[in-house]
Amino acid sequence: MVGDVGIGSKHPVVIQSMTNTLTTDVAATLSQVKKLAAAGCRIVRVAVPTEHDTKALKQIIDRAPVPIVADIHFSPARAVEAIEAGAAKIRLNPGNIKDKNDLNRIIDCAKQHKIAIRTGVNEASIRDLKNDTPPDGRVPLMLRELTGYVRLFEKGGFANLVLSAKSTDPVRTIEINRAISEKFHYPVHIGLTHAGLPEHARIPTAVVLGTLLSEGIGDTIRVSLAGDPVKEPQMSLEILQSIGLARRVHPELTVCPTCGRCQTDVIKLARTIDKEIKKINKPLKIAVMGCVVNGPGEAADSDIAVCAGKNKGFIYKNGKKVASVPESQIAETLFKMIEQF
């Protein structure tokens, strides 16, 4: 459990993200936490690099709508302070904690407060990789390092773990998470680290998360995008919906790719409809097709569809044609039918 959020096989996949505000700016951080929660995050992580941050953390935790995770690097003191401030989970890389006694102090504090710890490796932070790639490859090295961390926690009697291993490389990210899933029975957090700008990160991230989730690997996910973090849960939700792991709450718009048979501006029509249906909170399936050749069949499982012909549109409801209207009235007719739904 992370606060009141369950993580693991019997629970839905949990979307999370991380604030990019200064944690000491409590108002700004809380505002972003609330936006992330509204966008679909059930857990939000914040950075606590200084004592000033952990002092602000309690104020954020007390007023946040979702459990807060503290991101810890290097400092055992920050870890203990964050736990005592009420963090529901901490993210910790034991490789950054030099003294075993310090790690044991963190473990004891986490046990006392009954919180979870996410532990793992990031390919970029593994010291052995800075000089050369080992003979058996990077993935086995990442797995060995993670295994060592897990054994340290288990030796300390701590098993409330979430495991993660990340890389900027999509193939290695998939491979290491498959290896973790085979070797351990702890929940796994998955994501593609430092994925990049949204337009660059979208495809490789979807490939990694879609592949792993379709294989049953991944209990929490984060899409990592440079810029506005609110875009992260939006994309995470879209990925989960695409593979049937989350229920749609907004309309889904299907648009044909268009071809030489089109006799109307399908893309213009689709954009007009897309703009209007963004206001709707119902999981309708709406289709815009550019011809009457393949359109009716391809739109058969839609709630509402239009198959555009020359100067007119044929309107379908639940796969059955219900109207034929002039091109100028297609959008208006669809909107009226959507209102009826």
Image (cartoon, rainbow, N blue to C red):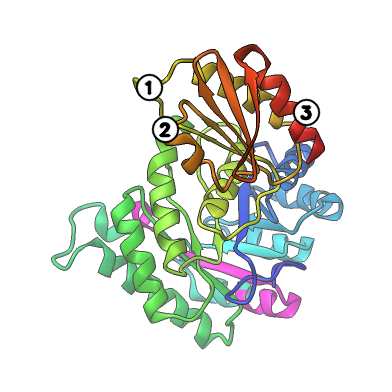
Q: Nearer the viewer, residue 281 or 226?
A: 281
Nearer the viewer's eye, disc 3 or disc 2?
2
**Label 3–label 2 contact, CB within 8 A:** no
Question: Residue 180: percent from the left, percent from the top?
Answer: 39, 73
- Viewer-nearest residue: 130 or 207: 207
Query: How many tags in the picture?
Result: 3
- Residue 56 position, x and y percent, is 78, 47
Cα–Cα gap, marks 2 and 1: 9 Å
Question: On the image, numbered disc 3 is attached to which residue?
Answer: 336
The location of residue 65, given as percent across then percent down, is: 81, 52
Q: Residue furthest left?
A: 135
75 to 1, vertically: above or below: above
Q: Quarter holding the C terminus?
A: top right
Which element is circle 1 on?
loop
Work out whether mark 2 precedes mark 1 in sequence or the reverse, and give the earlier one. 1
Image-based side of 228 in relation to 203, left or right: right
Q: Amino acid at mark 1?
A: Arg
- Pointer 3 or 1: first along the chain: 1
167 to the left or right of 9: left
C-alpha gap between disc 3 and disc 2: 25 Å
- Residue at x 62% of width, y 53% of height: 16
Q: Please name the amino acid that badge 3 sits on.
A: Lys
- Amino acid of disc 2: Val
Q: Which mark is residue 102?
A: none
Image mark for residue 261: 1
Horizontally, residue 84 falls left or right of residue 124, namely right
Q: Which residue is mark 2?
A: 293
**Which of the pair 18/279 is nearer the observer?**
279
